[in-house]
Amino acid sequence: MVNEKIRVRDLNIWFGEIQALKNLNLSIHPNEILSIIGPANSGKTTLLRTLNRLNDLLPNYRFTGEVYLDNEDIYKDIDVNILRKRMGMVFALPVALPLSIFENVVYGVRAQNIRSKRALEQITERSLKEAYLWDEVKDRLNESAYKLSGGQQQRLCIARTLAVQPEVILFDEPCSGLDPISTAKVEEAMVKLKKEYTIVLVTNNTKQAARVADRVAFFLMGELVELGLTDGIFSAPKDRRTEDYISGKFG
């Protein structure tokens, strides 16, 4: 039996009167890339925002069901600030801070009262290397992050997430605004990162899911239609709706 890093049980989510997720049951394995695909408004990003409790910030949000991280209920057993450290999130659009490249990387680390210059330098180098950005910026760490290209800023955001050493990384369409070369670098980083982290990737690019994912989940109108190994989902889906989406008949 495969261990579960994250377990979602009977999860229903509403925003006001609109139900965004319906009776979702899902397990995510340690050190895998689980890619979630599906058309707009299928509940993909809603699930990511639930996993690190960003939906809590919305006044009309309510839910039933349970979500576990390492068998701990994320709503009952884990402080929300600790949860967000353990489950870092990288958004579709890079949000570089108006600081130097170095200060962007260590922003979250400083909040943990790590002050040693040497320690911060080591964390910065490790994180930028893991994000495949070190070689491009190692001689300009004191420059503004705004001088980086869009693809570099996205990898900087990945490095900032990695700096606090999460256990899970949630990627919400991280390559949606990137050119093919930058996309390839982010994908290469993700594949390497799964050795140390569990990764959940929401993507509208089915080819990207096919390239990097170990397993793929297809969401449609708030429901999990199909979940399986990547090769099986793309070569022999069990549900006709999955096949229609992958083949481009809708979405």
Image: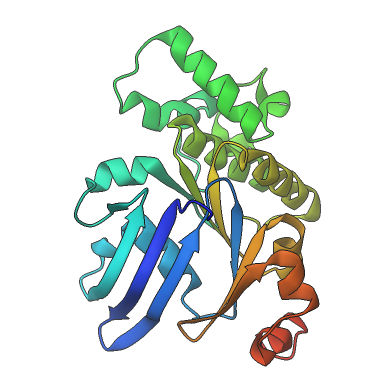
Q: Position of residue 175 (x, y in %)?
A: 65, 56
Relative to the observer, which residue lies in front, 59 or 234? 234
User: Horizontally, is 69 left or right of 173 in the view?
Assistant: left
Left or right: 16 in relation to 69: left
Q: Nearer the viewer, residue 196 or 133?
A: 196
Residue at 46% from the left image edge and 54% from the top image edge: 4
Give 113 or 37, whichever is nearer the viewer. 37
Image label count: 0
Looking at the image, which residue is at 25% across and 68% down? 58
Query: Looking at this rendering, what residue extends furthest in the front direction?
Result: 1
Residue 27 seen in the figure: yes
Q: Is residue 155 above or below residue 14?
A: above
The quarter of the picture where the C terminus appears is: bottom right
Residue at 44% x, 62% y is 48
Rendered view: 202 above or below 103: below
Residue 106 picture location, percent across and down: 44, 26
Kindly identify the residue that appears in the image at 73 percent across and 85 percent down.
243
